[in-house]
Image (cartoon, rainbow, N blue to C red):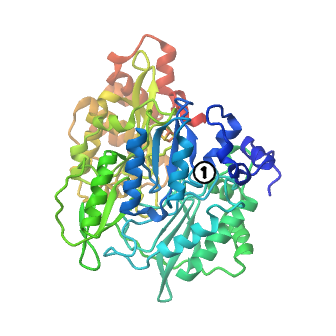
Amino acid sequence: MNKEKLNRRERYKAELSPYEYLKELDTVDFDSIGEGDRFYLQDCGIYTSEIDEDLFALRLRFNAGRISPQQLRLIAKIVKENDLEIVLTARAQMQLHGFESDNIYAVWKELNENGISTWQTFGDNVRNIVADVYDGVGKYAEIEVYPYIQQMQEYILNKPRFVGLLPRRISIGISGNSANVSSFFANDMYMALAEKDGIKGFNVYIGGKNTEIAQDADIFLKPEEIVKFFIAFVESFHQHGYRGSRAKTRVFHWIEHNGMEAIKSCIKEEYKADFVSAGKLILQKVHFNQTESLADGSYAYCYHTDFARISADEFNEIAEIALENKAEIRLGIDHHIYLIGLNRAELSFQAQRETSTVSSCVGSEYCPFSYWSIKDETAYLPLDKINEHNIHVGFSGCLKGCGKHQHADIGIVGLKTSLYGSSEKAARIFIGGEHSYGKAVAKQLFFLIPLDELDKFLRLIITEYEESEFNDFESFSKAVLNEYSADFLALWFLAKYDKTIKTNIPVKACLKDRQKQFVYEKNLLIKHFDDREFSKNIDEKLSTGVSMITKRLFKDKQTEDKSASHFAFSSSKSATIPGAVR
Ligand code: SF4
């Protein structure tokens, strides 16, 4: 183990293991729990709302998102009996909110006794291992990974050595499909379908998180080797991962500090065999429809939730349809519910929403780090355009990024600023994610857009794409947006917004020399937005122009408070970003 000073959570672990604590769960007085109790309870899925500490919530784990109609009905019954709310998550899990001290333990017990595990869904654990929702059944399914995931979960679930004792959480995604509904490159480890010497197996990517893409570890595994590799990876992180500052304990930091080759050596010690270099990644981008035909000729239907919110009645309805049609139910990591194996394409029930490509975090109702009620404020998005072009949008309540805003075509972070008078909601926008193939996270544009301008501003960006020669936003990002600096893009869109000039970014820029790139971008801006005030402000650097034009654009909203205006225009550090200091 590394010798750095243990963080607070590690000191709890050293004093008493979570497994030992949780053996006595039936003796816990939920009316008077303290910090230590809160720490341990997370490992069995129980946590308190940081908004109201008297309220509890529960996380439910579903292996690769697979859930039976009977389980769905049981949850619906519990939700009704206890007046709870349901939120689906990006780990194909579920959160139940609204428990009080007198019902949390009874429900926890009922669920776990009926085969719905809540264990290791929070805290420093291997979280629910996810797969593509069409694993083993879709047109693009090559290797079914569910049986391997079962073995992996068996290895870690409810085991004293693994309950809450890792240095930090590990998120794992595995796909044996050549096209996936969602990208897995934000996981700490992603095993992706690949081929080597005529054998299909998996390439390994390590170190992803909400703000980073998992890196190619240059390892190829045959299907029968992936469980062994998983064990070696988890054991190795358990022994060698960092346990000091919480801000530096993810797998990403372990790699950042030691380098990929050193990490691979650690894993190899546990694996006890040499690694084979990576094969050819088999991955294509496909748009999936609400109804899809499957490999065996049956159909799948994707039930769109209300940005991850769903009711007990809907659960009952979905369970009934699944039973009637002998269909399987799977939770997607896109917050939707899939009915698999239907014998007809049309169903007589209607999903709540048309939108399928917006991934949002839970927002201020359930998370104290958000100023925004994210799910309600999706109303400020141009959903018609997002749907029309299947644009992937990630929407987070803070820079921790649970809405995966940097693994999206367009990312939005809801912030609070005093730029526009008294504290007001404003959005930071990210664009240019090359998420499908794990090539680039979306980059931040250095300004804040007031909430009520958000729809108009995003339409401007989407119109730029519509008028391009590209058929999907990600290709447009790769060929156009990502050829330019973030300051140029910020200025380009602000200038268009300001002057309502109809002009589009030329496709070709790509000048590797920074000075040449700057001159090219500056001349392009002057050519398209010729304006003396504008031109003189970008002589030395483009960011000065960004500040100038932002002030002019939103001047009627500014206060006289100079410090407030400095605060808002100067840099990303100055806006109120609650989650960044968590
Ligand atoms: S992104 Fe921030 S606000 Fe949203 S759930 Fe995560 S921590 Fe909370």
Where does the image place residue 69, in percent across and percent down from the top left? 36, 61
Where does the image place residue 518, in percent across and percent down from the top left? 44, 44
Mark 1 nearby-residue class (10 Å; few <14, some 14–19, many ≥20): many
Q: Quadrant of the C terminus?
A: top right
**Tag 1: amino acid:** Cys
Q: Is residue 177 left or right of residue 115?
A: left
Towards the viewer: 77 or 242: 77
Depicted 66 relative to depicted 88: above or below: below
Residue farthest to the bottom, as pictured: 198
Instruction: Provide the residue designation for mark 1.
Output: 44
Q: Is mark 1 within 8 Å of ligand 1?
A: no
Towards the viewer: 124 or 257: 124
Tell me what residue is drawn at x 27 percent, y 39 percent. 528
Where does the image place residue 111, in percent across and percent down from the top left? 50, 54
Query: Splitting the image into 4 quarters, where does residue 530 fall?
Result: top left
Q: Is residue 288 visible?
A: no
Residue farthest to the right, as pictured: 3
Q: Is residue 53 left or right of residue 484?
A: right
Q: Quadrant of the N terminus?
A: bottom right
Towards the viewer: 237 or 122: 122
Q: How many numbered markers are drawn?
A: 1
Callout 1 secondary element: helix
Depicted 58 relative to depicted 544: above or below: below
Tell me what residue is drawn at x 56 percent, y 78 percent. 220
Q: Is residue 528 visible?
A: yes
Where does the image place residue 494, in percent across and percent down from the top left? 33, 34
Residue farthest to the top, as pictured: 560
Q: Is residue 205 left or right of residue 178?
A: right
